[in-house]
Image (cartoon, rainbow, N blue to C red):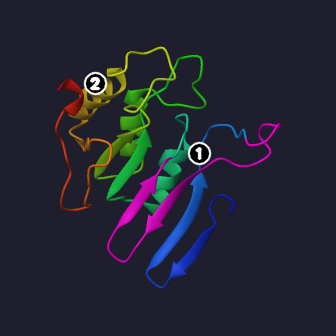
Amino acid sequence: MDWWQTNKLTDNIHFTATPARHFSGRGLVRNKTFWSSFILKTQSYNLFLGGDSGYDFHFKEIGEKFGPFDIAILECGQYNCAWPFIHMMPEQTVQATIDLHAKVLLPVHWGKFSLALHRWKEPIERALAAATLQNLKVTTPMIGETVIVGENYPGKEWWNS
């Protein structure tokens, strides 16, 4: 799929490829394929999966074209000021959620292992602080914990246990 293309999987399930800002690294030569974010729209819900992406105007454009979203699953870790085009700072993750017109943020790409120089808990701590200032709902499930859109949004600070 190319950016902005939608595949109708069933009458009630549509899958759309949308822009992201990263790089592709499959094979020996980089940037031969697109990097993407995705929208899964069902009869009941509108979900955004950001994949890896630096912050840019594309989040606002996606929000205007396809929002609001019931939940935005956005990367929130493995960042560095030297990599602004491939990973967002936690505060940018919160801003991207606002740009998307998403009701809930599910921050990912931070709690499994470290690839960057920041402290392991820093991404979620910074994202939660920024979300609090914006009055944005955030769900923080443990790896493998169930999130039920519209019903169950785990919020325990398990990383402090």
Residue 53 place in picture, x, y as percent:
55, 38
Could you tell me which residue is drawn at 46 percent across and 65 percent down?
Answer: 40
Residue 143: name its quadrant: top left
Residue identified by numbered label 2: 125
Bin the neighbour count of mark 1 within 10 Å (Cα to Cα): few under 14, some 14-19, many 20 and up. many
Can residue 101 be seen here? The reply is no
The residue range painted magenta reads 26-50
Q: Determine whether, in the image, residue 8 is placed left or right of residue 136.
A: right
Name the element at disc 1: loop
Q: Determine whether, in the image, residue 40 is placed left or right of residue 35.
A: left
Name the element at disc 2: helix
Bin the neighbour count of mark 2 within 10 Å (Cα to Cα): few under 14, some 14-19, many 20 and up. some
Front-most of residues 117 and 89: 117
Q: Determine whether, in the image, residue 87 is placed left or right of residue 12.
A: right
Q: Amino acid at mark 1?
A: Ala
Residue 121: name its quadrant: top left
The answer to if 60 sits in the magenta stretch is no
Residue identified by numbered label 1: 20
Q: Is residue 104 above or below residue 125?
A: below
Q: Is residue 118 above or below residue 135?
A: above
Q: Count the marks: how many? A: 2
Could you tell me which residue is drawn at 65 percent across and 47 percent down?
Answer: 35
Q: Determine whether, in the image, residue 62 is placed left or right of residue 85.
A: left
* Residue projecting furthest to the bottom: 11
Q: Amino acid at mark 2?
A: Glu
Task: Name which of mark 2 and mark 1 comes first in the sequence.
Answer: 1
Could you tell me which residue is drawn at 40 percent across and 33 percent down?
Answer: 112
Residue 34 place in picture, x, y as percent:
71, 49
Dominant secondary-structure state across the stretch colored magenta = loop
The answer to if 43 sits in the magenta stretch is yes
Can residue 84 be seen here? The reply is yes
